[in-house]
Image: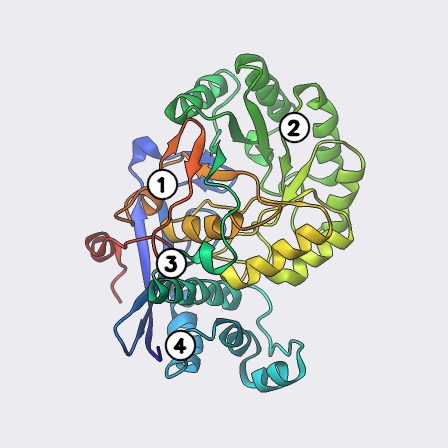
Amino acid sequence: MKIKSVKADWLHVPIPEQQQHTSDFGKTRSFDSTLVRIETEGGLVGFGEAKAAVGSAGTNAALNTMVEDELGPLLVGEDARDISRLWDVMYNGSRAHYAIDRGRVFPVLGRRGHLISAISGIDMALWDILGKSLDAPVWRLLGGCRKDRYPAYASGGWAPVDKIVAELQSFVDRGNFKAVKMRVGSGDGTLAHSVARVKAAREGLADDIDIMCDAHGTFSVAEAKRFCREVAECNIGWLEEPVVADDKRGMAEVRASSDVPISTGESEFTRFAFRDLAELRACDIFQPDLSICGGITEAMRIEAIASAYQLRYAPHLWGGALTFAAGLQTMVVASTGFIVEYSLGANPMLHELAVEDFTVVDGHLDVPDRPGLGVTVDEDFVEKYRVKN
């Protein structure tokens, strides 16, 4: 089980113009991801996914370099099954021996950003190898899933006031979803427009359809408070990232001012950021992105914090098939896991990178029991969209 090679491919998938949407991130013209491929000397191959940006598009050249040239050499010749130790080797660099010997972290510098994203993709691939070697899904190795199927919410919602109901209803119809998520915030131009869109959605959708709102961290604290007051009658399921992730005290202030549940975490790195969120009582729901937060190993530490603070866990699954699969593996074993994000924007990385598809039926997703992450990478897709050096 010794590691033979660690490789990274930047996949750049253009989105057809008629399927592009516009949000506060701008117009989504592509979906980008770094595909991590780890091969053992015995021939087992594991795959993971790392992201240079939390949204759909990103420039991944530096991230590829981090995977192959910075971290890869640390892993070649190591036993792929030693996942926890290898996480510390990558995170602590030249001081890893101190961390392993003394039981606390000694990071050299990269406590956020591309280093943690690179670790995330590698960590996923190592868990994929372990599952394949034992012919078991990763969730089995993490303690077993708690339910056979989980409710899912349709994630999208960019349309203006006069079209938002039609857009969200089309989401509901595609999988008989009982929950949808729409975008609000700076992309709407004004707070009043955001409020009007939410009220239109609540009025136009059936009463049994839950509505979540995602501000992508673009409200000020005052705007977020006002938004919560204005939509109080809409009984929204949560307000996601009301303010920028670096203003955790501001987020706590928003939460304290309203009974609207606050969710956050897709822009956070490692358990230490989530510890701070919990201690500040800044949110109700943790949403780590497993391509960014530190992978499966770190996500399980993050979920343990959620459990200790009586919070809930719903990973950010806006990514490719491997990000989706890895997040799902952790959610189904989590005592605090409760709902699956299902992207309904144009997302070829979710639906075409893998031979398998993740299909929502009657508003629920069945938990797959395929070995590893349960994803068979379509090599033709990789070859077609791989950015050539």
Q: Residues within 10 Å of mark 3 (few under 14, many from 20)?
A: some
Which residue position is annotated with label 2? 191
Secondary structure beneath dot 2 equals helix
Residue 136 disc label: 3
Task: Calculate the distance from the C-alpha at mark 3 to the C-alpha at mark 4.
Answer: 26 Å
Which residue position is annotated with label 1? 358
User: Percent position (x, y) of residue 296?
Assistant: 50, 60
Q: Residues within 10 Å of mark 4 (few under 14, many from 20)?
A: many
Secondary structure beneath dot 1 equals loop
- Mark nearer the N terminus (2 vs 4): 4
Direction from residue 15 to residue 117 in the image, left or right: right
Q: Is residue 51 visible?
A: no
Given the image, on which type of amino acid does mark 3 rest?
Ala
Secondary structure beneath dot 3 equals loop
Q: Between residue 99 and residue 148, name the one nearer to us.
A: 148
Given the image, on which type of amino acid does mark 4 rest?
Gly
User: Percent position (x, y) of residue 341?
Assistant: 49, 39
Quarter of the view holding residue 80: bottom left
Q: Residues within 10 Å of mark 1 (few under 14, many from 20)?
A: some
Label 1 with label 2: CB-CB less than 8 Å: no
Task: Calculate the distance from the C-alpha at mark 1 to the C-alpha at mark 2.
Answer: 35 Å
Task: Calculate the distance from the C-alpha at mark 1 to the C-alpha at mark 3.
Answer: 18 Å
Given the image, on which type of amino acid does mark 2 rest?
Leu
Residue 72 disc label: 4
User: Percent position (x, y) of residue 118?
Assistant: 46, 66
Locate the N terminus and report the quarter of the image it occupies.
bottom left
- Name the residue located 41 percent from the left edge and 50 percent from the top edge: 325
- Name the residue located 49 percent from the left edge and 48 percent from the top edge: 145
10 in relation to 288, above or below? below
Locate the C terminus and report the quarter of the image it occupies.
bottom left
Q: Nearer the viewer, mark 1 or mark 2?
A: 1
- Mark nearer the N terminus (1 vs 3): 3
